[in-house]
Image: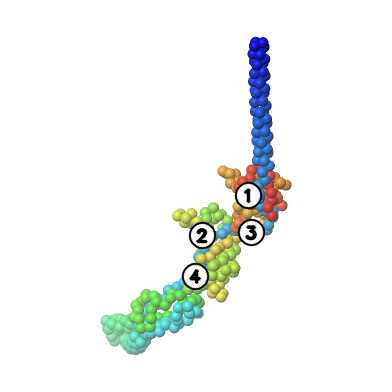
Amino acid sequence: MLRKRLLSGRVTGERASTLSILFAVLCILFFGVANFGCKGNEAKNVEERVMNVKVWNAESQSLRPFIETIGTLKPYEEVILSSEVDGIVKSIKVIEGSWVSKGMVVAEINETDYRLEVQRSQAALRQSEASLANAKLEYERKAALYKEELVTKQQFDDISARKELAEGDLDRAKATLELAREKLAKTKIYSPMRGLVKEKKVNVGDYVRNGTPLLWIIQSDPIKLSFTVPEKEVRKLRAGQDVSLKVDTYPGREFKGRVSTIYPSLDERTRSLQVEALVPNHDNSLKPGLFAKVTLYTGQAKDVVVVPVTAILYDNTNMKIFVAEGDRARERLVKIGSKYGEYMEIVEGLQKGEMVVVVGQNNLSEGVKIHVAR
């Protein structure tokens, strides 16, 4: 009886152990399947993640190729008027900012000494003329007597020499008078061009010497625009190309001009080429010294497909963009052309009318699902 009980207990224990093992296996399977299901859902959620983007419709626009740079306005011409004679400044007829015309008297040097010098030279000339006249009469008489051998050769040679000396004295007197008159004329200083007085360098009563600067005059119509072009753009330059410029002094106003001078060599330090353009300035609104934002047009208008510069991604030497096709992002390798301000020409890899991703493109990859935000 005891043996039966033992055997019965043994069987019961083995059954319980088997049931326990079976229960454990079922639990493992259950949790494994559940975990697998969760991971599957997670992967599915990652694959189906939607990226919000904004797009831009690639359009064909008629645009002129141009180069943007910074320039400085300079006078078309400028001259510093100096005194050509010594003396005291008698008058200055202009002030800073005054308009002057070509040939206008702008300053005077006291002319008293120079007028007296002209009078002395005139008197010396008259004396030389009288001396020459007497010498000529004497020469004519001696020449007639010499022919009749009534005077010696020595006497004839003497009068001939006197006549030549009198002629030389007359020439010197004429030159002296001409020089005196020229100096007298130089006591008046004339403007060599139409323009504005930039600076007055002396005052009335100052003593000046030959070469002393008196006035600084500039001509600003047209005004000269000086700017530089990078080395890589030099091949596009031509004399006569259109230029537009803007200055902070006149917001929203645009001024136009044309390229007048292209310098022959590049600046070795900056690797850029100096260029000058002339800009009409009839109302004198543009002032020398102003900085200008310059747009140099390098060709005629043409139809091009453009996208915002920010839409282009750089991958080593490749350039790419993303376009929206339905609800998917598609990667495109592109070839770029000229830059038009904030836009870049696409010469290969994009067609007119395609939707280019311009916001959110940095987070995209080929085939990613997207939602176009409005």
Callout 2, which amino acid?
Thr
Please report the residue visible at 56 percent of the width from the left and 43 percent of the height from the top: 316
Would you name the residue on which mark 3 appears?
64
Task: Give the spatial CA distance, label 3 vs label 4.
Answer: 29 Å
Disc nearest the viewer among 3 and 1: 1
Residue 194, horizontal then vertical, whole percent = 50, 77
Query: Of the residues under marks 2 and 4, which one precedes in the sequence?
Result: 2
Would you name the residue on which mark 2 appears?
228
Left or right: 132, with 270 as reference point: left
Query: Of the residues under marks 2 and 3, which one precedes in the sequence?
Result: 3
Height in image: 81 above or below 224? Answer: below
Q: Which mark is residue 256?
A: none
Disc nearest the viewer among 4 and 1: 1
**Split into 4 quadrants, where in the image is the N terminus?**
top right
Q: Is residue 305 visible to us here?
A: no
Would you name the residue on which mark 1 appears?
360
Height in image: 236 above or below 9? Answer: below
Please, what secondary structure does the residue beneath circle 2 have?
A: strand
Q: Residue furthest front?
A: 1
Query: Of the residues under marks 4 and 1, which one precedes in the sequence?
Result: 4
Task: Give the spatial CA distance, label 3 vs label 1.
Answer: 30 Å
